[in-house]
Image (cartoon, rainbow, N blue to C red):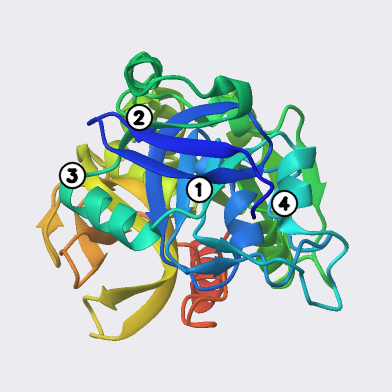
Amino acid sequence: MTDRSAAALVLEDGRVFRGEAYGAVGQSLGEVVFSTGMTGYQETLTDPSYHRQIVVQTAPQIGNTGWNDEDDESHRIWVSGYVVRDPARVPSNWRSTRSLEDALREQGVVGIAGVDTRTLTRHIRERGAMRAGVFSGDAVAGDEELLTRVLGSEGMVGADLAGDVTTSEPYVVPAVGERRYTVAALDLGIKSNTPRMMAARGMEVHVLPLGTSAEELLAAAPDGVFLSNGPGDPATADTAVALARAVLAARVPLFGICFGNQILGRALGRGTYKMRYGHRGINIPVIDVETGQVAITAQNHGFAVEGEPGEVFDTDFGPAKVSHYCPNDDTVEGLRCLEAPAFSVQYHPEAAAGPHDAAPLFDRFAGLMDRSGH
């Protein structure tokens, strides 16, 4: 690390953290957030839900297993900046093809290393996720100048970002073995493992761009509709909400995850709000209200649906219930319609957090399509 140029992480409240350049050199602006996963940095970096965010890794050493060509969750790295404490000097894994830093440099991701990430994480927990910037090389200037750049950047409230990450053209992930169902998946920032998990259960998944109309989607007569994860403020996602309402009205089975949970919540008349620092990591507990069962889940969200654990509320499509919650803060983690064939969760069932605590949700989706006759 001794031959690296100086770098700085500047937060919008004026706090400055010093370190050394890691990855690409230059300037990056975004919302600073922390992720508590001990592993899975490649999946984190390539998750479209992290679009326009500067990710702080709370695990002290990052990069040990290098970078490979199989574990990407999308076609590129989406984070706007990266903050680590102790980057591995040499990657060591039989699947590794290059180092983490090589991947960051190749894709122009500006990072900073040598930061006291424990202190930084505590600061974000106390003050909340906020605008920030990573600066290195020629981009470094006086603190006041760097703070001015940060304050001139856009915040996450009101950010409409799903359109930045959605697929430009529809594509199909074929079912493994016999095709039992046809699923229309609205791509709000979908991770590549999600269609694979559905395909393994006999679902032929048609991944559709965000701009797909409800009429186009329903004309294809899918057995079920899936709303994916994605970035940004759900209060801006009016197009996706209108589509979800049309699907609910048509009584087509609907399953949403993460951003999709917030879309379903809005379609059911619930509001959403920005959390202080969100849930990001692979070790977050969720309780099923019906059974009391606890699942250890993977999450990445900075917004949440309004509601209380176990709350039953009226909607335009019949009663619905807050089906899951996080015991850490009582955040809504799932919704279930009691009459319409629809449910959602705020976490990522395709990720191996528990390691498979949430995978049966895909089986539940299949059962919903069976019972609905679709």
Quadrant in the picture for the N terminus:
bottom right
Nearest to the eye among marks 4 and 2: give it. Answer: 4
Q: Which residue is mark 1?
A: 229
**Of the pair 217 and 291, the residue shown nearer to us:** 291
Residue 365's label in the rendered image is: none
Nearest to the eye among marks 2 and 1: give it. Answer: 2
Q: Which residue is mark 3?
A: 127
Q: Amino acid at mark 3?
A: Arg
Query: Left or right: where does residue 274 sit relative to residue 222?
Result: left
Residue drawn at x 39%, y 58% is 117
**N-term mark: 4 or 1:** 4
Give coordinates of residue 57: x percent, y percent: 47, 59
Nearest to the eye among marks 4 and 1: give it. Answer: 4
Give the Cα distance between marks 4 and 2. Answer: 27 Å
Specify whether residue 319 is in view. Answer: yes
Q: Which residue is mark 2?
A: 156
Q: Amino acid at mark 4?
A: Glu
Give coordinates of residue 221: x percent, y percent: 64, 43
Give coordinates of residue 119: x percent, y percent: 29, 58
Give the Cα distance between marks 3 and 2. Answer: 15 Å
Q: Amino acid at mark 1?
A: Asn
Query: Left or right: where does residue 49 sit relative to residue 109?
Result: left
Q: Residues within 10 Å of mark 2 (few under 14, many from 20)?
A: many
**N-term mark: 4 or 2:** 4
Nearest to the eye among marks 3 and 4: give it. Answer: 4
Q: Which residue is mark 4?
A: 101
Q: Residues within 10 Å of mark 4 (few under 14, many from 20)?
A: many
Image position of 137 with respect to 102: above or below: above
**N-term mark: 1 or 3:** 3
State the image quarter where residue 347 is shown.
bottom left
Give the Cα distance between marks 1 and 3. Answer: 26 Å
